[in-house]
Image (cartoon, rainbow, N blue to C red):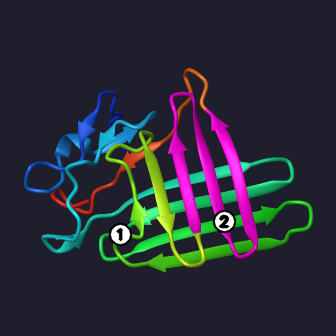
Amino acid sequence: MPLSEREITEPVDLAGPTGLLNPEAVGWTRTPLHRTDSVTHGLIGRTRTKRWEYWAITTPTHAVGLVVSDISYASTHGIFVLDRRTGEQISHDAVGLPGAASLPGTLGEGVSRSRTRTVQLEFTHHDDATHLSASGPRVRLEVTAHRPPGHQSLGVVVPWSQQFY
């Protein structure tokens, strides 16, 4: 059965005043349009809030995945590097206490950051580029991802129910 999800084309708050899901936020975007300033931390009803920023970088020689996430009761962060020539994989993952990650109210604006003993990530957003910095025991990475006019990035809200996300 085909599903048709709604494309969101204007900025929208993820949560309403009660902290529950704003039904208008369900769908996908081509640019960061979900405002998450109103998302509270900790438990809402029976569920937890979950926010993250993920970057995938591919070159002819390497594939890299970077993630900063805040899942209310903890923060999870990761660096993954694949050397496409040799097949060697390096993975550094860390779970931090609440507050080990900070994400801006709207992704794509400001800085996303995580700091643990083993993994440090920082994504700094500028008008036309994002600077990505990552370090772990075996990895140090500095990349500037240019975002020319018309550049797209996927944003999606997939709810658990009509109230929770």
Q: Is residue 157 magenta?
A: no
Provide residue 52's location: percent of width, then percent of height.
43, 58
Cα–Cα span, label 2 and label 1: 19 Å
Q: Which span is picked out in magenta?
A: 120-146
Quadrant of residue 23 in the image? top left
| Residue, disc 2 | 135
Residue 2 visible:
no
Kind of residue at badge 1: Gly
Q: Which quarter shows the C terminus? A: bottom left
Kind of residue at badge 2: Ser
Query: Which numbered marker is on residue 140?
Result: none
| Residue, disc 1 | 99
Q: Is the stretch drawn in magenta largely helix, strand or loop? A: strand
Provide residue 73's location: percent of width, then percent of height.
31, 76
Q: Helix, strand, or loop for circle 2?
A: strand
Quadrant of residue 93 in the image? bottom right
Residue 158 visible:
yes
Residue ID at (85%, 60%): 84
Residue 4 vs 88, above or below: the answer is above
Q: Left or right? Give the position of 62 relative to 70.
A: right
Check disc 1: other Cα within 10 Å, few if <14, some if 14-19, many if 20+: some
Q: Helix, strand, or loop for circle 1?
A: loop
Q: Nearer the viewer, residue 112 or 90?
A: 112
Furthest residue to the right? 85
Residue 155 vs 79, above or below: the answer is above
Residue ID at (17%, 56%): 162
